Image: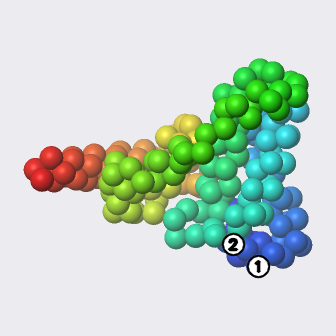
Amino acid sequence: MDGLDELMARCGLRDQGAFAELYRRTSGRLLAVALRIVRRRDWAEEILQESFVSIWHHAPGFDRVRSAPMTWMTTIVRNRALDWVRRPRHEQSGEDLEGLTESWTDEGPGPLERLQNSSDSIALARCLDELSGQQRQSIALAYLHGLSHSELAEHLGQPLGTIKTWIRRGLEKLRGCIDAVTSEATSR
């Protein structure tokens, strides 16, 4: 989608007009992502609203080098939707169980922080950085967002064969890099 980079940059500067335009241009696709996961429109709409609040708050830290704006926003929506699906049913229905949830509070590092600190994730990030932008984006959309090759081809505006080649070559390169990192770590 043309112009999303500029809109994200302006959102990072707290331009509310840019945020409204970003919402107008992307909300339909992002709602479809949430709806595909939760399969209820009311839940998907709530997830979309929460996601756009998160997008607004995190826009100043958005890094175009790491991912395309649509990929970044899709990741936020997908993760919120998956979290929603994993919630106990009473939370989804809106029952108030504040006392129960307070007993679950854990002051330790969260899963994301643990993942970022693990050596495996550091190795994977290093290996992903060695891929071309097209390979990295295609693999992320396919494996993290569940897009099929056909959906990827449509989303990225590329021929299906090109998408398959990017993914195949990217996975081969990724596998080689991870094998090298793993053997390097075990030889220490």
Circle 2: element type: helix
- Where is mark 2, residue-wise? 60
Quadrant of image for the N terminus = bottom right
Badge 2: residue crowd in 10 Å (few <14, some 14–19, many ≥20)? some
Residue at the image point whose x is 80% and y is 48% from the top: 50
Q: Give the CA separation, mark 2 to mark 1.
A: 7 Å
Residue at the image point whose x is 62% and y is 49% from the top: 75
- Along the line of sight, the residue nearer the viewer: 98 or 186: 98
Q: How many marks?
A: 2
Q: Is residue 61 visible?
A: yes
- Where is mark 1, residue-wise? 13
Determine which quarter of the picture holds residue 70: bottom right
Q: Is residue 151 visible?
A: no
Q: What amino acid type should be assigned to the residue bearing mark 2?
A: Pro
Left or right: 175 as drawn, with respect to 83: left
Vertically, is 67 above or below 110? below
Vertically, is 33 above or below 85? below
